[in-house]
Image: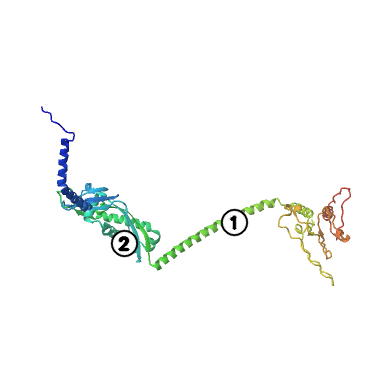
Protein backbone atom coordinates (compact mmCIF):
# COMPACT_ATOMS: atom_id res chain seq x y z
CA UNK A 1 0.00 0.00 0.00
CA UNK A 2 1.43 3.30 -1.08
CA UNK A 3 1.61 6.00 1.42
CA UNK A 4 0.24 9.36 0.34
CA UNK A 5 1.30 12.54 1.95
CA UNK A 6 -1.48 14.43 3.72
CA UNK A 7 -1.18 18.08 4.43
CA UNK A 8 -2.44 19.52 7.61
CA UNK A 9 -4.21 22.17 5.62
CA UNK A 10 -6.43 19.72 3.82
CA UNK A 11 -10.11 19.67 5.14
CA UNK A 12 -11.95 16.46 5.80
CA UNK A 13 -15.07 15.28 3.95
CA UNK A 14 -17.37 16.94 6.51
CA UNK A 15 -16.55 20.31 5.18
CA UNK A 16 -17.58 19.16 1.73
CA UNK A 17 -21.05 18.19 2.96
CA UNK A 18 -21.43 21.50 4.75
CA UNK A 19 -20.50 23.37 1.65
CA UNK A 20 -23.04 21.41 -0.32
CA UNK A 21 -25.74 22.34 2.28
CA UNK A 22 -24.94 25.99 2.09
CA UNK A 23 -25.03 25.87 -1.70
CA UNK A 24 -28.56 24.34 -1.51
CA UNK A 25 -29.71 27.03 0.93
CA UNK A 26 -28.33 29.78 -1.21
CA UNK A 27 -30.17 28.41 -4.19
CA UNK A 28 -33.60 27.89 -2.48
CA UNK A 29 -33.55 30.63 0.24
CA UNK A 30 -35.63 33.17 -1.67
CA UNK A 31 -38.34 30.59 -2.32
CA UNK A 32 -38.43 29.52 1.35
CA UNK A 33 -38.72 33.13 2.53
CA UNK A 34 -41.57 33.75 0.15
CA UNK A 35 -43.44 30.67 1.41
CA UNK A 36 -42.95 31.71 5.03
CA UNK A 37 -44.21 35.19 4.37
CA UNK A 38 -47.29 33.85 2.61
CA UNK A 39 -48.01 31.43 5.47
CA UNK A 40 -47.61 34.19 8.04
CA UNK A 41 -49.91 36.47 6.14
CA UNK A 42 -52.54 33.75 5.85
CA UNK A 43 -52.35 33.09 9.59
CA UNK A 44 -52.79 36.77 10.36
CA UNK A 45 -55.75 37.06 8.02
CA UNK A 46 -57.48 33.81 9.08
CA UNK A 47 -56.75 34.06 12.81
CA UNK A 48 -60.01 35.95 13.68
CA UNK A 49 -61.98 33.28 11.84
CA UNK A 50 -60.24 30.24 13.22
CA UNK A 51 -59.38 31.18 16.80
CA UNK A 52 -62.30 31.74 19.19
CA UNK A 53 -61.87 32.96 22.78
CA UNK A 54 -64.73 31.76 25.01
CA UNK A 55 -64.91 33.98 28.17
CA UNK A 56 -65.65 32.76 31.66
CA UNK A 57 -69.30 31.83 32.20
CA UNK A 58 -70.00 31.57 28.45
CA UNK A 59 -70.54 28.68 26.08
CA UNK A 60 -70.20 28.57 22.28
CA UNK A 61 -72.62 27.07 19.76
CA UNK A 62 -70.92 25.86 16.55
CA UNK A 63 -72.53 26.56 13.20
CA UNK A 64 -71.06 24.61 10.25
CA UNK A 65 -71.36 26.20 6.89
CA UNK A 66 -70.87 22.92 4.99
CA UNK A 67 -71.91 20.51 7.74
CA UNK A 68 -75.65 20.96 8.33
CA UNK A 69 -75.81 24.28 10.16
CA UNK A 70 -76.23 24.46 13.95
CA UNK A 71 -74.77 21.59 15.92
CA UNK A 72 -77.60 20.62 18.29
CA UNK A 73 -75.59 18.12 20.30
CA UNK A 74 -74.89 19.78 23.71
CA UNK A 75 -71.73 17.66 24.08
CA UNK A 76 -70.11 19.57 21.21
CA UNK A 77 -70.56 23.01 22.67
CA UNK A 78 -67.44 25.16 22.94
CA UNK A 79 -66.48 25.54 26.57
CA UNK A 80 -64.40 28.28 28.18
CA UNK A 81 -60.94 28.96 26.82
CA UNK A 82 -59.18 29.24 23.45
CA UNK A 83 -60.89 27.20 20.73
CA UNK A 84 -59.85 26.63 17.08
CA UNK A 85 -62.36 26.04 14.31
CA UNK A 86 -62.41 26.14 10.53
CA UNK A 87 -62.52 29.57 9.00
CA UNK A 88 -65.86 28.99 7.27
CA UNK A 89 -67.59 27.92 10.48
CA UNK A 90 -68.98 30.33 13.14
CA UNK A 91 -69.19 30.11 16.93
CA UNK A 92 -72.00 32.00 18.76
CA UNK A 93 -71.44 32.82 22.42
CA UNK A 94 -74.16 32.64 25.12
CA UNK A 95 -73.95 33.78 28.73
CA UNK A 96 -74.79 31.09 31.29
CA UNK A 97 -74.48 33.37 34.32
CA UNK A 98 -77.29 35.19 36.11
CA UNK A 99 -78.79 37.87 33.88
CA UNK A 100 -81.04 40.79 34.76
CA UNK A 101 -83.28 42.93 32.61
CA UNK A 102 -85.35 45.95 33.76
CA UNK A 103 -88.35 47.17 31.83
CA UNK A 104 -91.30 49.55 32.43
CA UNK A 105 -94.76 48.27 31.47
CA UNK A 106 -98.17 49.93 31.27
CA UNK A 107 -101.17 48.21 32.88
CA UNK A 108 -104.71 48.88 34.12
CA UNK A 109 -105.80 47.89 37.61
CA UNK A 110 -109.09 46.29 38.60
CA UNK A 111 -110.63 49.66 39.48
CA UNK A 112 -109.74 51.07 36.04
CA UNK A 113 -106.69 53.17 36.99
CA UNK A 114 -103.85 53.32 34.48
CA UNK A 115 -100.46 52.72 36.07
CA UNK A 116 -96.83 52.07 35.15
CA UNK A 117 -94.80 49.31 36.75
CA UNK A 118 -91.03 48.96 36.58
CA UNK A 119 -90.15 45.26 36.81
CA UNK A 120 -86.73 43.65 37.08
CA UNK A 121 -86.52 40.07 35.76
CA UNK A 122 -83.66 37.77 36.75
CA UNK A 123 -83.03 34.49 34.92
CA UNK A 124 -80.41 32.00 33.78
CA UNK A 125 -80.09 30.00 30.57
CA UNK A 126 -79.94 26.19 30.72
CA UNK A 127 -76.80 24.79 29.11
CA UNK A 128 -78.30 21.70 27.44
CA UNK A 129 -80.95 23.80 25.66
CA UNK A 130 -78.57 26.44 24.31
CA UNK A 131 -78.39 24.94 20.76
CA UNK A 132 -82.19 24.73 20.52
CA UNK A 133 -82.51 28.26 21.88
CA UNK A 134 -80.03 29.53 19.29
CA UNK A 135 -81.78 27.76 16.42
CA UNK A 136 -85.38 28.57 17.35
CA UNK A 137 -85.09 32.04 18.98
CA UNK A 138 -81.59 33.40 18.48
CA UNK A 139 -79.27 35.62 20.43
CA UNK A 140 -81.98 38.29 20.87
CA UNK A 141 -83.96 36.06 23.22
CA UNK A 142 -84.33 38.86 25.81
CA UNK A 143 -86.08 41.16 23.36
CA UNK A 144 -88.08 38.42 21.59
CA UNK A 145 -89.03 36.15 24.50
CA UNK A 146 -88.52 37.47 28.03
CA UNK A 147 -89.68 41.10 27.83
CA UNK A 148 -92.98 40.39 25.99
CA UNK A 149 -93.74 37.37 28.17
CA UNK A 150 -93.20 39.18 31.48
CA UNK A 151 -95.14 42.23 30.26
CA UNK A 152 -98.15 40.15 29.26
CA UNK A 153 -98.20 38.21 32.54
CA UNK A 154 -97.85 41.45 34.51
CA UNK A 155 -100.93 42.94 32.83
CA UNK A 156 -102.97 39.83 33.63
CA UNK A 157 -102.03 39.95 37.30
CA UNK A 158 -102.48 43.72 37.68
CA UNK A 159 -106.03 43.44 36.34
CA UNK A 160 -106.94 41.37 39.43
CA UNK A 161 -105.80 43.95 42.03
CA UNK A 162 -106.75 47.51 42.82
CA UNK A 163 -104.27 50.35 42.53
CA UNK A 164 -104.12 50.72 46.33
CA UNK A 165 -103.28 47.03 46.82
CA UNK A 166 -100.44 47.16 44.31
CA UNK A 167 -99.17 50.49 45.64
CA UNK A 168 -99.17 49.68 49.36
CA UNK A 169 -99.83 46.23 50.78
CA UNK A 170 -99.76 43.45 48.16
CA UNK A 171 -96.65 44.18 46.14
CA UNK A 172 -94.89 40.95 47.16
CA UNK A 173 -97.94 38.88 46.35
CA UNK A 174 -98.23 40.50 42.92
CA UNK A 175 -94.61 39.89 41.93
CA UNK A 176 -94.78 36.23 43.05
CA UNK A 177 -97.89 35.67 40.97
CA UNK A 178 -96.24 37.23 37.93
CA UNK A 179 -93.31 34.81 38.17
CA UNK A 180 -95.48 31.72 38.68
CA UNK A 181 -97.82 32.66 35.85
CA UNK A 182 -94.89 33.28 33.49
CA UNK A 183 -93.39 29.88 34.35
CA UNK A 184 -96.67 28.11 33.70
CA UNK A 185 -97.15 29.84 30.33
CA UNK A 186 -93.58 29.07 29.24
CA UNK A 187 -94.12 25.41 30.17
CA UNK A 188 -97.23 25.17 28.02
CA UNK A 189 -95.56 26.41 24.82
CA UNK A 190 -93.43 23.93 22.89
CA UNK A 191 -90.56 24.56 20.47
CA UNK A 192 -89.91 22.16 17.59
CA UNK A 193 -86.86 22.01 15.35
CA UNK A 194 -84.13 19.85 13.85
CA UNK A 195 -82.82 19.23 10.37
CA UNK A 196 -82.34 15.54 9.78
CA UNK A 197 -83.24 12.45 11.73
CA UNK A 198 -80.16 10.61 10.45
CA UNK A 199 -77.55 13.03 11.74
CA UNK A 200 -77.07 12.82 15.48
CA UNK A 201 -75.83 16.38 15.65
CA UNK A 202 -78.99 17.77 14.05
CA UNK A 203 -81.64 15.46 15.50
CA UNK A 204 -85.17 16.96 15.72
CA UNK A 205 -86.39 18.19 19.10
CA UNK A 206 -89.67 19.07 20.80
CA UNK A 207 -89.10 20.93 24.08
CA UNK A 208 -91.02 23.59 26.08
CA UNK A 209 -89.79 27.14 26.44
CA UNK A 210 -89.41 26.69 30.17
CA UNK A 211 -86.69 24.08 29.51
CA UNK A 212 -84.53 26.75 27.87
CA UNK A 213 -84.29 29.20 30.75
CA UNK A 214 -84.70 29.27 34.50
CA UNK A 215 -86.83 32.21 35.65
CA UNK A 216 -85.58 33.10 39.14
CA UNK A 217 -87.82 36.01 40.17
CA UNK A 218 -89.61 39.15 39.04
CA UNK A 219 -89.14 42.21 41.25
CA UNK A 220 -91.43 45.25 41.19
CA UNK A 221 -89.06 48.20 41.55
CA UNK A 222 -91.69 50.94 41.39
CA UNK A 223 -95.35 51.71 40.78
CA UNK A 224 -96.28 55.01 39.16
CA UNK A 225 -99.88 56.15 39.63
CA UNK A 226 -101.68 59.36 38.63
CA UNK A 227 -100.85 62.21 41.02
CA UNK A 228 -104.41 62.59 42.32
CA UNK A 229 -104.77 58.86 43.04
CA UNK A 230 -101.40 58.67 44.75
CA UNK A 231 -102.26 61.65 46.98
CA UNK A 232 -105.62 60.11 47.92
CA UNK A 233 -103.99 56.78 48.83
CA UNK A 234 -101.38 58.54 50.97
CA UNK A 235 -104.07 60.48 52.82
CA UNK A 236 -106.08 57.32 53.44
CA UNK A 237 -103.03 55.55 54.85
CA UNK A 238 -102.26 58.59 57.01
CA UNK A 239 -105.79 58.62 58.45
CA UNK A 240 -105.55 54.91 59.15
CA UNK A 241 -102.44 55.36 61.26
CA UNK A 242 -103.99 58.37 63.03
CA UNK A 243 -106.94 56.13 63.94
CA UNK A 244 -104.54 53.52 65.29
CA UNK A 245 -102.86 56.24 67.34
CA UNK A 246 -106.19 57.20 68.95
CA UNK A 247 -106.86 53.57 69.78
CA UNK A 248 -103.54 53.45 71.56
CA UNK A 249 -104.37 56.63 73.44
CA UNK A 250 -107.72 55.21 74.61
CA UNK A 251 -105.99 52.03 75.78
CA UNK A 252 -103.40 54.11 77.62
CA UNK A 253 -106.07 56.19 79.37
CA UNK A 254 -107.91 53.02 80.41
CA UNK A 255 -104.70 51.74 81.98
CA UNK A 256 -104.15 55.10 83.67
CA UNK A 257 -107.67 55.07 85.12
CA UNK A 258 -107.08 51.57 86.46
CA UNK A 259 -103.85 52.75 88.05
CA UNK A 260 -105.55 55.72 89.70
CA UNK A 261 -108.36 53.50 90.94
CA UNK A 262 -105.88 51.13 92.57
CA UNK A 263 -104.00 54.10 94.05
CA UNK A 264 -107.23 55.58 95.48
CA UNK A 265 -108.16 52.23 97.00
CA UNK A 266 -104.73 52.05 98.62
CA UNK A 267 -105.04 55.57 100.04
CA UNK A 268 -108.54 54.83 101.34
CA UNK A 269 -107.33 51.65 103.04
CA UNK A 270 -104.39 53.52 104.55
CA UNK A 271 -106.66 56.23 105.96
CA UNK A 272 -109.03 53.62 107.39
CA UNK A 273 -106.21 51.81 109.17
CA UNK A 274 -104.57 55.00 110.45
CA UNK A 275 -107.82 56.56 111.63
CA UNK A 276 -108.42 53.64 114.00
CA UNK A 277 -105.25 54.47 115.95
CA UNK A 278 -105.70 58.27 116.10
CA UNK A 279 -107.56 59.73 119.11
CA UNK A 280 -108.07 63.19 120.60
CA UNK A 281 -105.49 62.58 123.32
CA UNK A 282 -102.93 61.55 120.68
CA UNK A 283 -103.59 64.70 118.65
CA UNK A 284 -103.26 66.87 121.82
CA UNK A 285 -99.97 65.21 122.68
CA UNK A 286 -98.66 65.88 119.18
CA UNK A 287 -99.81 69.49 119.57
CA UNK A 288 -97.88 69.84 122.83
CA UNK A 289 -94.73 68.47 121.18
CA UNK A 290 -95.11 70.87 118.27
CA UNK A 291 -95.56 73.80 120.69
CA UNK A 292 -92.43 72.88 122.61
CA UNK A 293 -90.39 72.57 119.42
CA UNK A 294 -91.78 75.90 118.28
CA UNK A 295 -90.70 77.49 121.56
CA UNK A 296 -87.20 76.04 121.28
CA UNK A 297 -86.59 77.44 117.79
CA UNK A 298 -84.13 80.32 117.53
CA UNK A 299 -86.26 82.62 115.38
CA UNK A 300 -88.83 85.12 116.61
CA UNK A 301 -92.47 84.39 115.87
CA UNK A 302 -95.98 85.40 116.88
CA UNK A 303 -98.25 82.60 118.08
CA UNK A 304 -101.96 83.09 118.75
CA UNK A 305 -103.16 80.88 121.58
CA UNK A 306 -106.43 79.08 120.82
CA UNK A 307 -109.66 79.40 122.81
CA UNK A 308 -110.34 75.66 123.14
CA UNK A 309 -110.22 73.74 126.37
CA UNK A 310 -106.63 72.73 125.65
CA UNK A 311 -105.39 76.24 124.90
CA UNK A 312 -103.12 74.98 122.12
CA UNK A 313 -101.87 77.37 119.42
CA UNK A 314 -104.38 78.14 116.75
CA UNK A 315 -102.47 76.14 114.15
CA UNK A 316 -103.01 73.00 116.22
CA UNK A 317 -105.80 73.81 118.68
CA UNK A 318 -109.42 74.93 118.50
CA UNK A 319 -110.44 71.58 117.08
CA UNK A 320 -113.45 71.31 119.30
CA UNK A 321 -114.12 75.04 119.91
CA UNK A 322 -116.85 76.85 118.07
CA UNK A 323 -115.87 80.11 116.42
CA UNK A 324 -116.89 83.18 118.44
CA UNK A 325 -117.96 86.45 116.86
CA UNK A 326 -115.43 89.26 117.01
CA UNK A 327 -116.01 91.77 119.85
CA UNK A 328 -117.88 94.89 118.96
CA UNK A 329 -115.85 98.00 119.73
CA UNK A 330 -117.39 100.65 121.98
CA UNK A 331 -118.57 103.97 120.66
CA UNK A 332 -115.74 106.24 119.80
CA UNK A 333 -113.13 103.50 119.99
CA UNK A 334 -111.01 102.51 117.08
CA UNK A 335 -111.50 98.86 116.16
CA UNK A 336 -108.41 96.81 116.91
CA UNK A 337 -106.17 96.05 114.02
CA UNK A 338 -105.88 92.46 112.81
CA UNK A 339 -102.67 90.73 113.68
CA UNK A 340 -100.80 88.67 111.16
CA UNK A 341 -99.81 85.28 112.48
CA UNK A 342 -96.82 83.33 111.42
CA UNK A 343 -97.32 81.22 108.29
CA UNK A 344 -97.61 77.48 108.73
CA UNK A 345 -94.27 75.88 107.82
CA UNK A 346 -94.18 73.68 104.72
CA UNK A 347 -92.47 70.89 106.67
CA UNK A 348 -93.91 69.39 109.87
CA UNK A 349 -92.58 71.05 113.02
CA UNK A 350 -91.51 67.78 114.55
CA UNK A 351 -89.14 67.23 111.59
CA UNK A 352 -87.58 70.74 111.61
CA UNK A 353 -84.64 71.06 114.01
CA UNK A 354 -84.67 74.33 115.94
CA UNK A 355 -80.94 74.88 115.51
CA UNK A 356 -81.25 75.14 111.72
CA UNK A 357 -83.87 77.92 111.75
CA UNK A 358 -82.75 81.53 111.23
CA UNK A 359 -82.73 83.99 114.12
CA UNK A 360 -84.41 87.23 112.98
CA UNK A 361 -84.48 90.35 115.07
CA UNK A 362 -87.18 90.76 117.70
CA UNK A 363 -90.27 92.73 116.85
CA UNK A 364 -92.43 94.29 119.56
CA UNK A 365 -96.06 94.86 118.50
CA UNK A 366 -97.00 98.56 118.62
CA UNK A 367 -100.76 98.10 119.14
CA UNK A 368 -102.28 97.26 122.54
CA UNK A 369 -103.09 93.66 123.29
CA UNK A 370 -106.52 92.33 122.47
CA UNK A 371 -108.51 89.87 124.43
CA UNK A 372 -106.69 87.00 122.73
CA UNK A 373 -103.17 87.18 124.20
CA UNK A 374 -100.13 86.97 121.93
CA UNK A 375 -96.68 86.03 123.03
CA UNK A 376 -93.33 86.27 121.38
CA UNK A 377 -91.38 83.10 122.01
CA UNK A 378 -87.62 83.45 121.79
CA UNK A 379 -84.84 81.15 122.76
CA UNK A 380 -82.28 82.80 125.03
CA UNK A 381 -78.92 83.08 123.38
CA UNK A 382 -75.53 83.03 125.01
CA UNK A 383 -75.12 86.77 124.51
CA UNK A 384 -76.79 89.24 126.83
CA UNK A 385 -80.22 90.12 125.38
CA UNK A 386 -81.03 93.76 124.91
CA UNK A 387 -82.91 95.52 127.69
CA UNK A 388 -86.68 95.50 127.32
CA UNK A 389 -89.29 97.71 128.93
CA UNK A 390 -90.95 96.35 132.08
CA UNK A 391 -94.30 96.17 130.33
CA UNK A 392 -92.85 94.08 127.49
CA UNK A 393 -91.18 91.73 130.03
CA UNK A 394 -94.51 91.30 131.75
CA UNK A 395 -96.43 90.53 128.56
CA UNK A 396 -94.02 88.37 126.52
CA UNK A 397 -92.38 85.33 128.19
CA UNK A 398 -88.78 84.98 127.16
CA UNK A 399 -87.67 81.62 128.65
CA UNK A 400 -88.75 77.99 128.61
CA UNK A 401 -89.70 78.08 132.29
CA UNK A 402 -92.10 80.95 131.54
CA UNK A 403 -93.71 78.93 128.78
CA UNK A 404 -94.13 75.91 131.06
CA UNK A 405 -95.65 78.06 133.78
CA UNK A 406 -98.05 79.60 131.30
CA UNK A 407 -98.98 76.19 129.95
CA UNK A 408 -99.65 74.84 133.48
CA UNK A 409 -101.90 77.80 134.25
CA UNK A 410 -103.90 77.33 131.07
CA UNK A 411 -104.36 73.56 131.42
CA UNK A 412 -104.86 73.57 135.22
CA UNK A 413 -101.99 71.17 135.95
CA UNK A 414 -99.28 71.50 138.60
CA UNK A 415 -96.52 73.92 137.57
CA UNK A 416 -93.05 72.43 137.04
CA UNK A 417 -90.61 72.88 139.95
CA UNK A 418 -87.38 74.81 139.22
CA UNK A 419 -83.95 73.85 140.51
CA UNK A 420 -84.44 75.94 143.73
CA UNK A 421 -87.73 74.23 144.58
CA UNK A 422 -89.92 77.29 143.94
CA UNK A 423 -92.54 77.10 141.22
CA UNK A 424 -91.66 79.15 138.17
CA UNK A 425 -94.60 81.40 137.65
CA UNK A 426 -95.03 84.27 135.33
CA UNK A 427 -98.02 86.58 135.26
CA UNK A 428 -99.87 86.39 131.99
CA UNK A 429 -101.67 89.24 130.42
CA UNK A 430 -105.41 88.95 130.59
Q: Which residue is mark 1?
A: 260
**Front-most of 155 and 195?**
195
Q: Which residue is mark 2?
A: 155
Residue 17 against residue 268 in the figure, above or below: above
Marks 2 and 1, the one that precedes in the sequence: 2
Query: Where is residue 188 shown, x and y percent of the image?
Result: 25, 55
**Horizontal side of residue 244 vs 258, given as left or right:** left
Q: Is residue 295 visible?
A: yes
Query: Where is residue 158 shown, x and y percent of the image?
Result: 33, 61
**Front-most of 169 and 422?**
169
Q: Is residue 205 visible?
A: no
**Horizontal side of residue 259 vs 57, given as left or right:** right
The CA distance from mark 2 to mark 1 is: 58 Å
**SS category of the residue bearing label 1:** helix
Q: Which mark is residue 35?
A: none
**Horizontal side of residue 209 vs 324, given as left or right:** left
**Horizontal side of residue 230 vs 274, given as left or right:** left
Query: Where is residue 297 shown, x and y percent of the image?
Result: 78, 54
Residue 365 against residue 349 in the figure, above or below: below
- Which quarter of the figure is the N terminus placed in? top left
Corner quadrant of residue 228: bottom left
**Front-most of 177 and 413?**
177
Q: How many marks?
A: 2
Residues packed near mark 2 inside 10 Å, few (<14), some (14 to 19) or many (20 plus): some
Query: Where is residue 406 shown, x and y percent of the image?
Result: 84, 55
**Front-most of 320 and 109?**
109
Corner quadrant of residue 162: bottom left
Amino acid sequence: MDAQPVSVYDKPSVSRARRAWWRFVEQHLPVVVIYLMVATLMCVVLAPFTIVNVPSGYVGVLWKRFGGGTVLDPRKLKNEGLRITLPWNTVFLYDLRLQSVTQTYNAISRDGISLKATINTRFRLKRDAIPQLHQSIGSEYIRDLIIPEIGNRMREVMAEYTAEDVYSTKRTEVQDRIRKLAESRLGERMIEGGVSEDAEENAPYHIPLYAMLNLIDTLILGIELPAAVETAINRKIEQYYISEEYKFRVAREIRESERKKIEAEGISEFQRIVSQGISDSYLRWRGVEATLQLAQSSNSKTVIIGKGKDGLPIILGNVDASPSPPPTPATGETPPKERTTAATPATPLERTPGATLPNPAEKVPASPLEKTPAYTLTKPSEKTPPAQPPEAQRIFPTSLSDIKALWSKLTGTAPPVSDTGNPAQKPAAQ
